[in-house]
Image (spheres, helix red, strand yellow):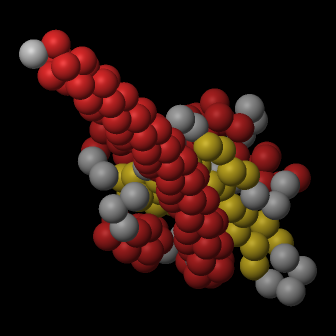
Amino acid sequence: MGMRMKMALPIAKLRSLSTRIVLVAVLVVGVALTAASIAASLYNADRTRQDLSQKAGALAVMIANAAPTLVVGQDTTTLGNLLASLQRDPDFRAGIIGDDFSVLAAVAEDAEARSAFNPQYLQSLIGEDPWTYVEQNESFSYEGERFLLRIQPIYIGANQRLVGYVGLEFD
């Protein structure tokens, strides 16, 4: 009887040791998978932000290239339609086209957002009037915590005379 008891103890210790080894291995794999998952998530978030920034820039340039004659002709209806076409983009939040005197077109996801997205709001982010800013700079990009803003000057003619600006905001 004493012999059986002595043999049972080393087997119990072996099982305990193997269980510990398995637990450590599972823990190591779990930590590695968690770290890999976090790294992939951060990479994906950064990549998504870069893609949104590129898209915002491309759309601002596209609107700026399509709008010069409409701005000079004060065609607010077509300018509004041009901005409204961006509303199909799920990331688009608000847009504005202005010149040195007024806002020619403004579009947003709702009336409250449209009234809030104005030259004064842009000025609070830029630090100066949007028209004054685009007279001296090519474009403006601002990345907030929850949004991305792009302001692009609108030029016309061979001498590239400034006639307006477009401001777009994306979530």
Residue 89: x %, y % from top left: 36, 67
Residue 20: x %, y % from top left: 36, 29
Q: Quadrant of residue 8?
A: top left
**Residue at figure coordinates x 16%, y 13% from the top left:** 2
Viewer-proximal residue, 152 or 33?
Answer: 33
Position of the N terminus by quadrant: top left
Viewer-proximal residue, 94 or 37?
Answer: 37
**Residue at figure coordinates x 28%, y 44% from the top left:** 111
Q: Quadrant of residue 162?
A: bottom right
**Residue at figure coordinates x 56%, y 64% from the top left:** 51
Task: State whether residue 106 appears in this view.
Answer: no
Left or right? Give the position of 4 relative to 42: left
Q: Is 164 above or below relative to 147?
A: below
Task: State whether residue 154 appears in this view.
Answer: yes
Left or right? Give the position of 11 relative to 117: left
**Which residue appears farthest toward the top when viewing the image?**
2
Q: Is 50 above or below relative to 31?
A: below
**Residue at figure coordinates x 84%, y 55% from the top left:** 137
Residue 87: x %, y % from top left: 34, 65
Left or right? Give the position of 171 relative to 68: left
Residue 94: x %, y % from top left: 43, 52
Viewer-proximal residue, 146 or 97?
Answer: 146
**Which residue appears farthest toward the left when viewing the image?**
1
Viewer-proximal residue, 108 or 26?
Answer: 26
